[in-house]
Image (cartoon, rainbow, N blue to C red):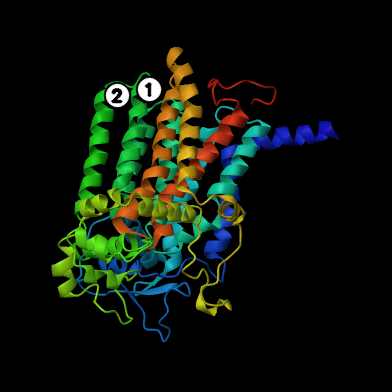
Amino acid sequence: MSKILKSWCSKFAKRVSPAMFATILVAIISGIILFIPPIKGLGDNGDFYNVLLTNGLYRLPMHYNQLSDYVINKFGILHYYNENHFYTFTSQMISVKLAMFLNKLFYSRTVFDIRFMGLVHYGFYLGGIYLLTKSLVHPFRKVGSYVIAFLVVLILGDSAYTLFFNSFYAEAGMFVLIIYIMAAIMSLARDVYAKNWPMVWLFFVASILLVTSSQANASLTISLVIMAIGLVFLPGFKARRLAVAFGALTIFLAGVGIYFSANEEAVNANKLQAFSQGVLLENTKDPTEDIDRGGVDGQYSLIRGKNYYTDSYTAIKPSGAYTKKHLLKKINVGWTVHYYATHLKQFNNLLDVAATDIPNLQMKNVGDFSRNSGHKPRAQTRYFTLYSATLGAFYPGKYAFDLLIMIGAIGAYAVGFYLDNKRNHYYGIVRFFLVVGLMLALVYIPIYAVITGGEFNLAQRLFMAVTSLNLTILLFVSDIINHTLWHTTPEEDDDEE
């Protein structure tokens, strides 16, 4: 029986590589959730507004106003000149325009189906899964390689990620792009392909698109530039120092450009929410005196916990002209940093709140089903969410734990860096800079999120932090299975192809 099983496994391995195995599985799993009625995705928490206006789309008339309760799967396409143009250019516009092109080509020129948005993300996602899995298992097709492929499916095929595809949230593109970034670096580290330059180009193009996909992603410049440093150590890469320096500079400039491209309304909204849902929260006493000492009128403590846009009664209108003149012109990132520097306990409490939200990958404040699906408002799907649910259940809600994970991961991969540096190998060196970039994102994104927006929509703004954590976990387990954590030259065994 064992001989028959071994023979069958050998035939399977020859016909289906680990990378193809993972790609087929995620294609089936995510295809069901995205395209089989009733379709699933994510409701609109208000983020769709600018994307719709920018790209010539609008909400069709409906008698139901709670857009966040259900997935809206049909939108109107403007027939004439779009007077709104765009507020800020982001790389997300590329995927939206491509989805609209396919929609007009195969479906309708007047009505946009959200599944075409899902189709664009889905297609690029499958390519990324294939490249990443191939880079993690190269050069073998052994049993462990298929275990790694299954882990790729379990972690990166989780519905908490793929639900974003049927939506206009920037997180969908961000998720796909970070997969390509990691796949490019690991392919270069492990010599998956004969030539380096295609993967080098893929890394820099994907990095620039990621940074420019949202104003909030400007902070990712730090991690991506660090990852790029590892490429300097690649052999046979002519003019690599100059090429990497130019690429890193381009990423940096893209990050600076997207940060300062935000319109005044968006800047004011972020300022207000950083103040009302950050500075004024987690304060054990009346914050009036604290903000008064910072040069801000104590009366603004009345907007504690308020959003910039609010339909409910408030003593001082957060988005009003008086607030803009007497509050928003006085506060900025520097003012907020100075405040937290003198209120470290409060800042630490906010970071612990962020740590609690890090594993909450699935958006809880919007529904996953369409209105005619028979589900209750804001119902959440449990389809293929084992990994995200487990992470959410067991991940400690302490920022100190995030720091320990960062130190532990960087320390573990520093050994491979040291050994490969002595032996003039580059796998452990390139991989080390990748891990440093991912782990720093886990630590500084919560800080950036709290300073720039307080607790407002915090779980969503920590998307790249938890994704960085998940990619590091995947890399770590794959290196354990491949026996390449410290001894980075893969060990041959009898199951090698």
Please determine whether, in this image, residue 160 is positioned above or below residue 418. below
Task: Report the disc number at residue 234.
Answer: 1
Residue 462 seen in this snapshot: no
Q: Quadrant of the N terminus?
A: top right
Identify the residue under disc 2: 240
Image coordinates of residue 145 in percent, x first then y, are: 62, 34
Image coordinates of residue 361 in percent, x first then y, are: 49, 56
In the image, what residue occupies the spot 66% across and 30% down? 142
Tag 1–tag 2 contact (CB < 8 Å): yes
Indicate the secondary structure of the residue bearing disc 2: helix
Q: Amino acid at mark 2?
A: Arg
In the image, what residue occupies the spot 42% across and 79% down? 66
Taking the image as shown, residue 211 lies to the left or right of residue 358, namely left
Q: Amino acid at mark 1?
A: Leu
Image coordinates of residue 179 in percent, x first then y, are: 45, 44
Q: Quadrant of the C terminus?
A: top right
